[in-house]
Image: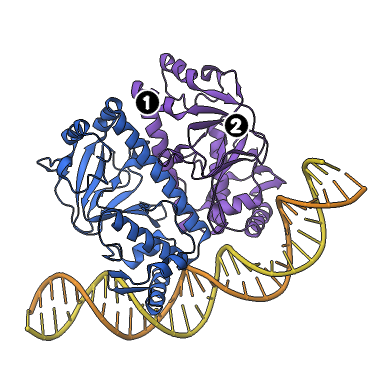
Chain colours: A purple, B blue, C orange, D yellow
Amino acid sequence: MTLRPTQACQHCTLRQLCLPVGLPQDELWQLDQIVQQRRPIAKGAALFTMGAPFDSLFAVRTGALKTVLISDDGTEQITGFALAGDLLGLDAIHSSTHPVSAIALESTSVCAVPYSHVDDLAGRLPTFRQHMMSVMSQELAQDENLHVLLGQRTAEQRLATFLITLSERHRARGLAANRFCLPMSRADIANHLGLTQETISRLFTQLRKQGVISLHTRDLQILAPDQLRNTAGVTITSAASSA
Amino acid sequence: MTLRPTQACQHCTLRQLCLPVGLPQDELWQLDQIVQQRRPIAKGAALFTMGAPFDSLFAVRTGALKTVLISDDGTEQITGFALAGDLLGLDAIHSSTHPVSAIALESTSVCAVPYSHVDDLAGRLPTFRQHMMSVMSQELAQDENLHVLLGQRTAEQRLATFLITLSERHRARGLAANRFCLPMSRADIANHLGLTQETISRLFTQLRKQGVISLHTRDLQILAPDQLRNTAGVTITSAASSA
DNA sequence: CGAGCCTTTGATTATGGTCAAGCGCTGTGG
DNA sequence: CCACAGCGCTTGACCATAATCAAAGGCTCG
């Protein structure tokens, strides 16, 4: 729990994406007061573990994580991938305990925001309160889209949709939408989409052969975005899902 | 949008389950001020429709609804079933538009809670604000469990888990946990679980033959709860999921 | 440079989907 | 009150998608 000197949200490149969204200047500094930066998490290490007591929300500053739910029969489910600007821990408020583990996919740094302070701010700053409600609401709507993906779509459609979603999330961060690095393994993608590693590998090969993507190890290029959208089958309503 | 005389949350049999949970007496009457009761929704009719503007949350008073997301290729996904005491509309806060339709499965009555008032109360009453955050957080955690169900479990496990979840929700309402009526069709169950009507029908037959349940039309009895839990494979962490 | 993990590819299988037909409630109108 | 229409449910036969099992190639990192 080593703390580093707090770095101002005001100067953060993620302020258009992260908690500060829409906050007026005079409220922003109040957020700055409560945000703590932590030392980086190594690849494979946990930011928090399933079952651990909840006391802070986390905002990803750099890097990427997966959130994993392990059932008592040992099966794992990756419930999502968090990229820079994403918020982690909202699912833990209810039970005061993290229902998932958050594992770094690469060296990752986060800001910690003690939840008691979040609640306090939510009471005092209407804009901030509304933003928190909005963020949680958005996640609920995204989960509904994920439900559609797992319930109604073929393996091919799931993977294509996943890639488009990732692409949109990069776009929302001002990064290249058609060329980026996959921070997660094929097995991780498979698990998240309710498929197997082998199926994902075969589908990648297929998309490569069709000239839709180029993929070397984890360096992805979307060569034919329209065709990818086409194989996804149906457009996703909200652009940048945290799936 | 015919309004009826407001009926007090204080005297509602659902106050231990619904929005009033944990509210001190002096805050409860403030909630009463903003809750409106509506005229019943007929079976098959919509409480709200996907794409419609959001302005109120709804609490189910009696009856049951399904929430349905329709993709632009026409495929439908039932994202959940709402029973008495459940809250609807939290997923609409972000976009100010309902991402799903809510369709009554039987004649259903609801309370409407204008969201502007909810936000106002959340600013003034810490207990209420914390409760709202907790409810949304709980739904996020439940969605993660649903993700596991759709991503990792067999058809048999999904149905068994679904029945157990329904049973627990009845128990939480003080109703019989081992005998109740299914308000939804086989096709609805199938759709929600990412399966087909035929598979659900076959599984029900199988469970009947095994003596685990008795099911006549929609009248369900769980004869062997332990065996049902066993076929579900893994215990669900949080008891009463709104799945 | 080598160990181990990640990825790819192939062969085979199984789970659940699709297509099809028939039964049985339920509710309505004669 | 009964007949019938229509929908919901069940069951069967067959099929397809993706899982499983297996093996080999290719990064990455110590």
In the shown orientation, is residue B11 left or right of residue A146?
Answer: left
The residue at the point 41 percent across, 76 percent down is: B206
Q: Determine which quarter of the picture holds residue A125.
A: top left
The location of residue A228, given as percent across then percent down, is 57, 49
Report the front residue among B228 and A202: B228
The image shows residue B32, relative to residue B226, as above or below, that is above
Quarter of the figure that contains the N terminus of chain B:
top left
The location of residue B196, given as percent across then percent down, is 42, 67
Closer to the eye: label 1 or 2? 1
The residue singled out by tag 2 in the image is: A175
The residue at the point 64 percent across, 45 percent down is: A184
In the shown orientation, is residue D17 left or right of residue B29?
Answer: right
Crowding around mark 1 (Cα neighbors within 10 Å: few <14, some 14 to 19, many 20+) is: many
Crowding around mark 2 (Cα neighbors within 10 Å: few <14, some 14 to 19, many 20+) is: few
* Chain ID of residue with mark 1: A
The location of residue A211, given as percent across then percent down, is 66, 50
The residue singled out by tag 1 in the image is: A122
